[in-house]
């Protein structure tokens, strides 16, 4: 992740904006929840809102500045509504 910001060809196609801190993962037991848009994703469409509690906490996430136009955020951390790259 840390080097993607330095590769313009790859950075241009990512669905999120990176910062220099994006290469430093936030570690720990990080609880995540589904965003409302996740229901339309083929990966998450089978999960209902009652099943959100079944999501396993992540070991680490990579912070990003923001999502790019047209990108859909499927998961967010419970602590903040900031999109993360997992």
Image: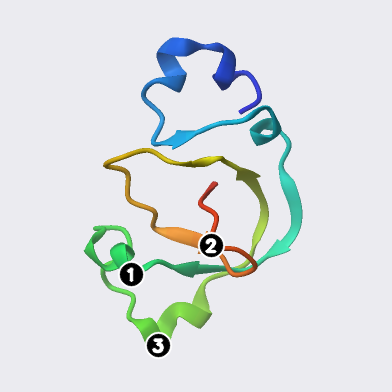
Pointer 3: residues within 10 angstroms few (<14), some, or many (20+)? few
Closer-to-camera residue (44/77): 77
Mark drawn on residue 81? 2
Instruction: State which mark lies toward you, 3 or 1.
Output: 1
Report, in whole angstroms, how far the alpha carbon at label 3 lies from the one at label 2.
Answer: 20 Å
Which SS class for mark 3?
Answer: helix
Q: Bin the neighbour count of mark 2 within 10 Å (Cα to Cα): few under 14, some 14-19, many 20 and up.
A: few
Residue under circle 1? 36
Residue depicted at 39% across the width and 58% down the height: 74
> Which marked residue is nearer to the observer: mark 3 or mark 2?
2
Compared with 3, 55 (above or below) is: below
Q: Which residue is drawn at 68% across and 27% down?
A: 20
What kind of element bears circle 1? helix
Q: Which of marks 3 and 1 is nearer the N terminus?
A: 1
> Residue at image x 64%, y 35%?
22
Residue at the spot of label 3: 50
Q: How far apart are marks 1 and 2 (CA)?
A: 12 Å
Quarter of the rendering containing residue 40: bottom left
């Amino acid at each position: 992740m840390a080097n993607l910001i330095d590769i313009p060809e790859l950075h241009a196609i990512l669905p999120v904006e990176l910062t220099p801190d994006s290469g430093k993962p936030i570690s720990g037991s990080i609880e995540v929840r589904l965003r409302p848009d996740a229901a339309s994703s083929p990966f998450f469409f089978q999960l209902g809102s009652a099943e959100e509690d079944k999501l396993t906490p992540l070991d680490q996430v990579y912070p990003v500045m923001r999502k790019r136009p047209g990108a859909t955020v499927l998961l967010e951390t419970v602590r903040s509504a900031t999109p993360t790259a997992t």
